[in-house]
């Protein structure tokens, strides 16, 4: 029990490392949460810092999710719930980071790492559809929401109704909550597209 709790706690602390904030601070001396859309994630990093830093942030945020799940498998004593909870904890840490006054990103890159590690094939199916949607619409937020929505659906289709399914459902709720402003903008046709230099400046 204690190793499992340590794994979940450490996963939250790992998730709380906001690479977007750290990179923007080191490269430009700015708080990225006060620029662009104000989100501490890869998409806003692309808008504010450019492609190279955005790709680096994306990779590092995905790796946080992967590392959290494997930590749960290592310390979880064979339980499927522990890696699932560790994955959720990493996403919670990314969204509400302890080190940065609980103002983080929206957790999609970390979610990709978590779900690809927990359930690779369902995540691949959901990811492929999400990527196609982003390519054709250039709405990253829409693709992100489709990914988190389809992942539990594909888990259900493949008959994997267990801890990973319930974790993916909870993660989906998290994602929709964090993207609630994006959903409104999508409905109103005001959402920024991939590569756009727009975005509401946060002051």
Image (cartoon, helix red, strand yellow):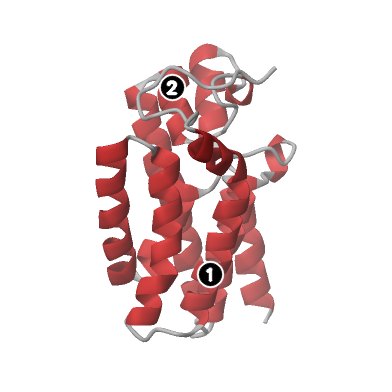
> What x and y, as percent, mark residue 97?
67, 44
The structure residue drawn at horizontal position 54% and vertical position 76%, both measured from the top left corner, is 166
The structure residue drawn at horizontal position 40% and vertical position 25%, both measured from the top left corner, is 46
For disc 1, the marked residue is 169
Give residue 116's quadrant in the image: bottom left
Quarter of the image containing the C terminus?
Answer: top right
For disc 2, the marked residue is 47
- What distance separates the C-alpha of mark 2 from that of mark 1? 30 Å
- Residue 135 seen: yes
The structure residue drawn at horizontal position 69% and vertical position 36%, both measured from the top left corner, is 100
- Along the horizontal axis of the image, is 121 left or right of 165? left
Circle 1 crowding by C-alpha within 10 Å: few under 14, some 14–19, many from 20: some
Give the vertical position of 35 relative to 179 (above or below): above
Give the vertical position of 168 relative to 45 (above or below): below
- Along the horizontal axis of the image, is 7 left or right of 140? right
Quarter of the image containing the N terminus?
Answer: bottom right
């Amino acid at each position: 029990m204690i190793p499992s709790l340590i794994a979940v706690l450490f996963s939250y602390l790992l998730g709380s490392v906001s690479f977007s904030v750290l990179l923007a601070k080191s490269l430009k001396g700015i708080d990225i949460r006060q620029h662009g859309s104000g989100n501490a994630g890869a998409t806003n990093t692309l808008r504010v810092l450019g492609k190279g830093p955005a790709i680096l942030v994306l990779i590092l945020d995905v790796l946080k999710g992967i590392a959290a799940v494997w930590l749960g498998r290592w310390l979880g004593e064979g339980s499927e719930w522990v890696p699932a909870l560790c994955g959720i904890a990493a996403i919670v840490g990314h969204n509400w980071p302890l080190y940065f006054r609980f103002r983080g990103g929206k957790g999609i890159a970390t979610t990709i790492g978590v779900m690809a590690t927990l359930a690779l094939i369902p995540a691949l199916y959901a990811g492929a559809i999400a990527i196609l949607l982003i390519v054709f619409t250039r709405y990253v937020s829409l693709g992100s929401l489709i990914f988190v929505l389809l992942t539990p659906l594909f888990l259900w289709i493949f008959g994997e109704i267990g801890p990973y399914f319930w974790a993916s459902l909870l993660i989906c709720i998290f994602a929709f909550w964090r993207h609630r402003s994006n959903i409104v903008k999508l409905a109103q046709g005001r959402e920024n597209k991939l590569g756009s230099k727009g975005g509401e400046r946060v002051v």
